[in-house]
Amino acid sequence: MIALPTNMPLIRVGRDSVTLCQPEWLTNKFTNAATGTNVPVWLAEDISRGVENYLTNHYQGSVIDHDVLLDQIDTTLLKMGLNNVAENMDKTPPPVRISLNELARRAGAGYELAFFHLLELQFLSAATGGALSLECHGLTQCVRRLSSSRKWTRRCDLLKAEIESFLEKKKKQAARLWPDLEITVNQ
């Protein structure tokens, strides 16, 4: 059994990326969609809580595809007669967080090529899935894991620079294909 940080399922974005379904993200989706319509903000917030309740208490899986979630939301809004809110609904997935340390764990100590391959797959999956925000985190732990080093060494500096260079290259490539995609890297 896995323990999710929230009781809501994870959201699958693309083929291989998953991200947390956070209440704030849902609330922002609904309140932004209600802006400029005759739907008051309190109703949009109430609908968001209803979706959260459904995902927490009634959804059977631990992962839901982003497209499936949006289709269910659209269907529900249309049944409620809130066509204008459904039309205004932003179809963008939530930000996708990529744990560099987890990718390093999956690749194995000393297997930098496998790590870079896994990282590229995560980028492609999230970007082709429609994500507009990628957050890479855990760079320092990732470097230590890949280099099998307890103390920071010159090899760690070189590997960190190589990973940062790779991420910068991916940012530039992504900017050409997906100009709205934002990529951030946290240590």
Image: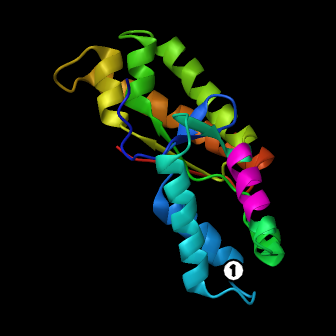
**For this view, does 157 lie left or right of residue 181?**
left
**For this view, does 75 lie left or right of residue 105?**
right
Q: Residue at x 71, y 58 (%)?
A: 73
Q: Amino acid at mark 1?
A: Ala
Compared to 183, does 12 lie above or below?
above
Q: How is the image coloured?
A: rainbow
Q: Residues within 10 Å of mark 1 (few under 14, many from 20)?
A: many
Residue 79 in sight in this render? yes
- Where's residue 38, x and y in %? 74, 90
Assign the N terminus to one quadrant of the image. Answer: top left
Compared to 140, does 29 lie above or below?
below
Q: Which residue is mark 1?
A: 34
Assign the C terminus to one quadrant of the image. Answer: top left
* Residues rendered magenta in the picture: 68-76
Element at badge 1? helix
Q: Residue at x 63, y 26 (%)?
A: 121
- Where's residue 69, x and y in %? 68, 49
* Predominant SS along the magenta part: helix
Q: Residue at x 59, y 85 (%)?
A: 41
| 102 or 110, nearer to the observer | 102
Compared to 115, does 123 lie above or below?
below
- Where's residue 165, x and y in %? 52, 35
The answer to which image quadrant residue 28 occupies is bottom right
